[in-house]
Image: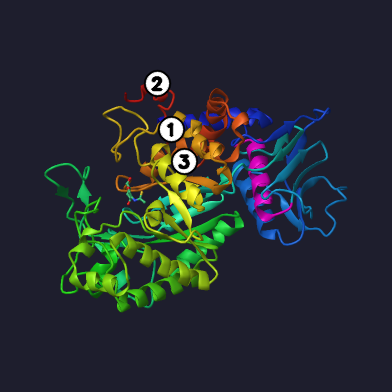
Amino acid sequence: MKRLFITACILCICFYSTAQNAHLIIPKPAFISYPHSSEPFVLANKQPIFYSANFEAQADYLKQAILKQTGIELEIRKSSDVKNRSTTGIYLILIATSNNSPEQYELNVNKQNIDIQFHDLRGLVNGIQSLLQLMPIGQFNVAKISPIHIEDQPRFAYRGMHLDVVRHIFPISYIKKYIDYLAFHKFNTFHWHLTDDQGWRIEMNAYPKLNSIGSFRNETLIGHFKDSPAQYDGTRYGGFYTKAEIKEIIQYASIRAITVIPEIDIPGHSRAAIAAYPELSTKPDTIWNVATTWGMYNRQNNVLAPKPATFRFLEKVFDEVVALFPSPYIHVGGDECSKIWWKQDPATQAFMKENGLKNETALQTYFIEFIAKYLQSKGKQTIGWHEINEGDLDTSTIVMNWGTEKQAIEAASKGFNVINTPGKPFYFDHYQSQDPKDSLAIHGYNPLEAVYNYNPIPTAIIQKGLSSKIIGGQANVWTEYMGNEKKVDYMIFPRMTALSETLWSAPEKKNYADFLKRLEQNAIPRYLFWNSSWFNEYKKWDLSKSPK
Ligand code: TNX
């Protein structure tokens, strides 16, 4: 009821307001100026959106977004000459230049026209997001947009959000909504964590038991995994995305210029795979269940055993993944691979001896190198969690660091490109308050202010001259304690909004007080418009509340 009232109020306020202030745009643009004339552009039904070249899908995306946000219905028109702006309307203009940086756009609003100038698809989509933020939310016959000139481009090339759909699965409708969250915030990558101990969530044809057995668990733990005694809900749980659904998501994301990177987590985190095919495990005669609890590391066997059947399995699985995902990158996990199961297994030890692998860390590197080479032969680059760098791995792979600065520095110094996703503060499964009554989370304290203030290029990296090795950052959303969409929303908002600025805007453009103002006046009305939940005590829980 209260939510409905707030929504109604916001809609009313917008009905009487005219234009949004460009100074409210999130993430903060690189450059904004205000033209001399203050006469607004008046957006009205049937106005054309002119688009050049092959950008019909984006013109239509903009049209639909404007309709949803304002109730005003525009028309899209292909135009071979968008430079001659004689008709009032919105112009999406491809500018062919060689020396501009990727994803750059320019947005101009004046009394006659609006134009977005860009030189790549992502630039166009970024410009569309800024334009939508200049438009009011509500139902209007016309909407006024104040004159503005924006020139903008991102700080980092890789700006990602991850989502674990294993611990809890979410419907395709929510995956699309999540991708819309990414688009609004100018992220360019969705990291889809599709397999883990608690389930296999992608349709596989060559190994059908991955779905019939591996996609379902008998029940799920209730409460925190460290609680004792452990309690379970007694309800079978699971499911997987069909290839048709995955294609639908990839298509949806591609219109929004978002790359979808699938993660198939090997050689650890493979309990669902060995439950389906025990012959791939270190104990082929065991009946493994798909995991029903969290945090398996060294507690339950979840590793693939090195044998011909396993390597054949990996090739076939990744063949299907490569065929499905156009992404130039494939994530192979590689995290938290317990060595104890390999240590205990004579067949694994014999394999290591035959192949001159001096310890289990070398075996882990062997697995990653095997699959990285295979993927390379298919034109794909491998990403793995920072543990892939424990041994002596070839630096053609990309390291995704979920540790501290130490692991980022280690990887960058060796020559790896690094995506920085440090547990502190980029893990959105950690608490954002220290209120004991806050909704269950894994542990830790990652408040909004910490996300906003973190520099993905740590000082030590700058000092060593390795800044260019940090290609971007990402927040990870592990869903052990996020059983439904509302809980995911609550954990990501408003932290995701802060992260978008941390990854997009130059450090000298950032200011937390200014961000909080824009959050309140621009982002929170969006959360309401999306009917999304968020954590609203972010002002109270700042960095001064950090534990000693
Ligand atoms: C570690 S971070 C994991 C995940 C868990 C997470 C909980 C990483 C690469 N592996 O499997 O969900 O901790 O925070």
- Amino acid identity at mark 3: Asn
Q: Nearer the viewer, residue 164 or 511?
A: 511
- Amino acid identity at mark 1: Arg
Residue 543: name its quadrant. top left
What residue would you read off at disc 1? Answer: 3
Residue 21 can be seen, yes or no = no
Left or right of 376 in this view: 547: left
As drawn, 168 above or below 147: below
Spatial CA distance of label 2 from label 3 is 31 Å
Spatial CA distance of label 1 from label 3 is 9 Å
As drawn, 382 above or below 491: below
- Residue at image coords 48%, 52%: 414
What residue would you read off at disc 3? Answer: 531
Residue 246 can be seen, yes or no = yes
What residue would you read off at disc 2? Answer: 544
**How dense is the environment of label 1, judged by Cα within 10 Å: few (below 14), some, or many (20 and up)?**
few
Contact, mark 1 vs mark 3 (Cβ under 8 Å):
no
Disc nearer the start of the sequence (2/1): 1
Residue 253 painted magenta: no
Disc nearer the start of the sequence (2/3): 3
- Residue at image coords 48%, 34%: 454
- x, y percent for residue 271: 26, 63
- Amino acid identity at mark 2: Ser
Cβ of disc 3 within 8 Å of ligand 1?
no
- x, y percent for residue 231: 15, 47
Q: Nearer the viewer, residue 343 or 104?
A: 343
Which residues are drawn in magenta? 119-137
- Residue 105: mark in rendering: none
- Quarter holding the N terminus is top left
Disc nearer the start of the sequence (1/3): 1
